[in-house]
Image: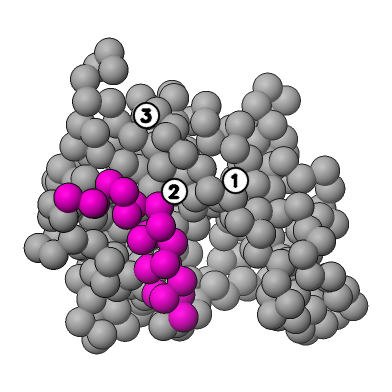
Amino acid sequence: MGKCQQCGLLYVDPRPSDDEINDANKVGVHRGEDGALDVRSHYRASKTRQYAAIIRKLFGHDWSEGKPISWFDVGAGYGEVVAAVQQVAPAGSTVCGIEPMQPKVERAQSLGLPVSSRLLKDMTGPYDVISLINVYSHVPDFLSFGAELVAKLRPGGVLFVETGNIADLANREQFADKLYLPDHLVFSGPGQMRRTFEQIGLVLESKDERAVDSLLWCAKVAVRNALRGRISVPLPWHSKFRTVFYKARRPLTRHA
């Protein structure tokens, strides 16, 4: 791992080539120092319920007038977030998502969810909300990628991002789970995210930090550690790791 001495961003070093990253994202398997890393999973209805509650809380005020909105989810996976937005967005809203991993696309479509394998450049917008749920760490050049997203936002629209605060942790032991390298390429904290939003022309409106080390999470991490030959049982509610939800808004005018 490398660390930017100016901003504190953590990054994988050496980084896989762009072709390796793109190919791995399509099939869900990465080549790392410890062999193949399989990041394929499955659709989880519990995630849809979880995100429906979070989105209702964080966007409820925005939607109080009941005006339909357009929501675009990037890196939609199996479509849990798309399904969540369909449940809680105002009536008449449109929701869509894109995902590079074809098996995930096919599973989402089998559930009737509007998730496709279209490329970002082919999505024209404009959208009221673009979401990146645990996608930030997969993007090697977020300034360029983020600028492309901002161009697809309506003035006043929101970039909604979830990512962790690993760059703010004092040491590796404060995050008990696996880092999933090189599937994850960069790690940030709130300070880095605020600067990034400013650089791509957005204003950070709010952030919502949440602990994840529940008893169930710790039990799952302990099992994963044991399967990797590492005896480590994290204590619940002790970690300083947080998953953070950011709402960064595109100004209504250039000088807003």
24 part of magenta stretch: no
Read off the residue under disc 1: 186
The answer for how far apart the CA atoms under marks 3 and 1 are is 20 Å
Q: Nearer the viewer, residue 251 or 29?
A: 251
Tags 3 and 1 touching, CB below 8 Å: no
Tags 2 and 3 touching, CB below 8 Å: no
Read off the residue under disc 3: 202
SS under mark 1: strand
Q: Is residue 33 left or right of residue 122?
A: right
The answer for how far apart the CA atoms under marks 2 and 3 are is 12 Å
- Secondary structure predominantly adopted by residues drawn in magenta: helix
**Residue lying farthest to the left in this orientation:** 92
The segment highlighted magenta reads 46-65
Q: Earlier in the sequence, mark 3 or mark 1?
A: 1
Q: Quadrant for the N terminus, please.
A: top right
Tags 2 and 1 touching, CB below 8 Å: no
Q: Which mark is residue 161?
A: 2
User: Residue at (29%, 35%) from the top-left corner?
Assistant: 150
**Residue lying farthest to the top in this orientation:** 255
**Image x and y of residue 171, in percent:** 84, 48
**Image x and y of residue 96, in percent:** 21, 62
The answer for how far apart the CA atoms under marks 2 and 1 are is 14 Å
Amino acid on which the number 2 mark rests in the picture = Val
User: Residue at (49%, 50%) from the top-left corner?
Assistant: 245
Amino acid on which the number 3 mark rests in the picture = Leu
Q: Nearer the viewer, residue 206 or 74?
A: 206
**Does residue 143 show up?**
no
| Local crowd size for mark 2, using a 10 Å CA cut-off: few (<14), some (14–19), many (≥20) | some
Q: Quadrant for the C terminus, please.
A: top left
6 shown above or below 144: above
131 shown above or below 111: above
User: Residue at (51%, 43%) from the top-left corner?
Assistant: 207
